[in-house]
Image: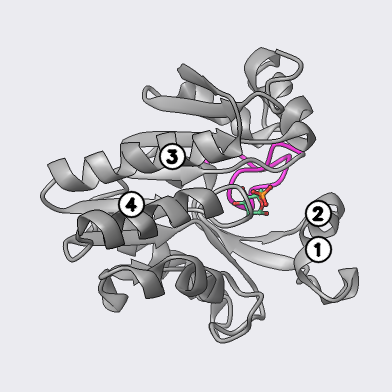
Amino acid sequence: MKLICIENYAEMSVVTGKIIVDKIRTTQSLTLGFATGSTPKGVYNYLIEDHRANGTSYQQVKSVNLDEYIGLKAQDPNSYHYFMRQNLFDHLDIKQNHTHIPNGAAGDLEQECLRYEQLIKALGGVDLQLLGIGQNGHIGFNEPGTPFSSRTQIVTLARNTREANSRFFNSLEDVPTHAITMGIASILESKEILLLVSGEKKAEALLKFMNGEISEEFPASALKHHQNVTVIADRDALKYI
Ligand code: GLP
């Protein structure tokens, strides 16, 4: 595992953005794994700026996202479909039918999990996966206790995850209780992983990740089984390291 220590969020976004752009420019056809939440927003801004300024093209890029809330339609402003359109896809030349996000409004959710898992396989797997981390160590929406062998699945969100994400909703009650997420085994199949950790709120999670043991009680620790993980963390997140 490689650790890149960075001064602040802005710098973290640039460093990560450059790694992604470099990959796009040097790889013929690429599948990127995208994440949501506040952490990757700066990276997405970098990609948008770079696309405008340098014309980096996403015509050959395919993408899969980690997760989606159950019960929110793609048009819902709190859905991750909406988030990705607003914060990235609408500003690039990526083809809409090349972008994939689990459908949290599917009639048959079990079937949707299978479909998504097969889709990732059909795309040849994820080449570069961007990850954030929850304060409780979740990756995607895989909460503590999730088996490392898990595949794309329906999960019940932990109360602290719903509380952390309630800042985007009118109230805690409005935050969905369930989500579809790529499983931990699905995430670990990505060829390369970038884990972004920013801010003091994540300092404890980063400490646990770096120094704690590998345990299903701390989902991100599964990444230690992976051969090509780069942690990109800023000074506030590195407070206890
Ligand atoms: C959400 C997402 C995760 C994300 C995490 C951290 O619950 N499902 O993929 O990594 O929250 O979010 P943030 O970056 O806003 O701290």
Classify mark 2 as within 8 Å of ligand 1 or not, answering yes or no: yes
Is residue 119 at least partly visible in the picture? yes
Of mark 3 and mark 2, the one earlier in the sequence is 3
Residue for point 54% across, 81% down: 108
Q: Mark 4 sits on what residue?
A: 32
Q: Are marks 2 and 4 in contact (CB under 8 Å)?
A: no
- Which amino acid is tagged 1? Arg
SS category of the residue bearing label 2: helix
* In the image, residue 145 lies in the stretch drawn in magenta: yes
Q: Mark 1 sits on what residue?
A: 167
What's the magenta bit mostly, secondary-structure-wise? loop
Left or right side of 184 for 218 = right
Q: Which quadrant would residue 88 be assigned to in this image?
A: bottom left
- Which amino acid is tagged 3? Val
Q: Are marks 2 and 1 in contact (CB under 8 Å)?
A: yes
Q: Which residues are magenta?
A: 136-149
Crowding near the residue tagged with mark 3, few <14, some 14–19, many ≥20 C-alpha atoms within 10 Å: some
Q: What distance separates the C-alpha of mark 1 from that of mark 4?
A: 27 Å
- Which amino acid is tagged 2? Ala
